[in-house]
Image (cartoon, rainbow, N blue to C red):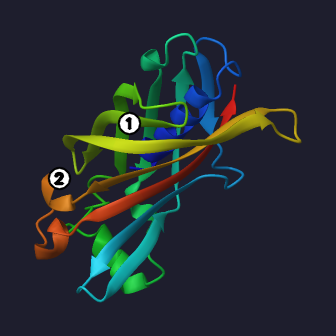
């Protein structure tokens, strides 16, 4: 999941930085500097929302400035890194009822199509794999900005949102059909 989110965000950011990238530029997600996050929110009994994140993920993207539709994104998320700031709940989410992190330690996203809407937004279609089940998802992405950083690198950033439920990926819990909103904030460093 994390990999999916991050790569998607980076690709959009690069797409909108017209002229800042050359064909087939490669970016990696800045997880070492903690300049990227894969967040989630789930409704709780109709009263509030459970907020969480995946603490460990990686990924990257390529961007073709001449033809953004030929760009791509790949992300990998460590499912055991789910963190909702409640140990008992996090352990339950890692169990077979939901993510089954011991059997399926990674969730992945790989883009299949990028559709530009305007100079700031795009839809990123791709394959999300959780619990060894692959389903198509669309991430609605927005370019945040790009440019040189103080350390001599070039960065592009974006945010993206999609909604899933774990029932679609084979999670057996009665609560697995609740909508999960994934909210991604990503910075990519050009290689």
- Tell me the SS state at disc 1: strand
Q: Please tell me which residue is depicted at 36% across the width and 33% down the height of the picture.
A: 110
Q: Is residue 4 above or below residue 84?
A: above
Q: Please tell me which residue is depicted at 87% across the width and 33% down the height of the picture.
A: 152
Residue 25 image position (x, y, % from top left): 62, 19
Which of the labelled discs sits on residue 157, or is there none? Answer: none
Question: Where, quadrant-wise, is the C terminus in this rendering?
Answer: top right
Residue 136 image position (x, y, % from top left): 22, 38
> Mark 1 — residue?
123
> Mark 2 — residue?
169
Q: Is residue 106 above or below residue 82?
A: above
Q: Closest to the observer: 106 or 168?
A: 168
Q: Is residue 60 above or below residue 41?
A: above
- Tell me the SS state at disc 2: helix
Q: Please tell me which residue is depicted at 28% across the width and 52% down the height of the picture.
A: 104
Residue 25 falls left or right of residue 33: left
Q: Closest to the observer: 68 or 76?
A: 68
Residue 80 image position (x, y, % from top left): 40, 62
Q: Please tell me which residue is depicted at 20% across the width and 66% down the height of the picture.
A: 96
Q: Is residue 51 above or below residue 39?
A: below
Q: Closest to the observer: 40 or 173?
A: 40
Q: Work out how far the residue at label 2 is from the one at label 1, CA to CA, in angstroms.
A: 22 Å
- How packed is label 2: few (under 14 Cα within 10 Å), some, or many (20 or more)? many
Residue 190 appears in the picture as rendered: yes
């Amino acid at each position: 999941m994390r990999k999916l989110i991050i790569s998607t965000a980076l690709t959009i950011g690069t797409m909108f930085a017209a002229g800042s990238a050359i064909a087939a530029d490669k970016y990696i997600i800045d997880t070492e500097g903690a300049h990227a996050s894969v967040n989630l929110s789930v409704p709780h009994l109709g009263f509030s929302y459970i907020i969480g994140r995946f603490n460990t993920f990686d990924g990257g993207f390529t961007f073709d400035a001449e033809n953004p539709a030929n760009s791509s994104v790949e992300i990998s998320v460590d499912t055991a890194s789910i963190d909702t700031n409640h140990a008992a709940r996090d352990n339950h989410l890692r169990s077979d009822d939901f993510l089954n992190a011991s059997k399926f330690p990674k969730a992945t996203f790989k883009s299949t199509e990028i559709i530009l809407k305007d100079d700031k937004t795009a839809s990123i279609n791709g394959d999300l794999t959780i619990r060894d089940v692959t389903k198509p998802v669309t991430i609605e992405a927005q370019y945040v900005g790009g440019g040189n950083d103080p350390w001599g690198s070039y960065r592009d950033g974006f945010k993206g949102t999609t909604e899933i439920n774990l029932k679609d990926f084979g999670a057996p819990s009665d609560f697995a059909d609740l909508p999960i909103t994934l909210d991604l904030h990503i910075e990519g460093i050009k290689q």
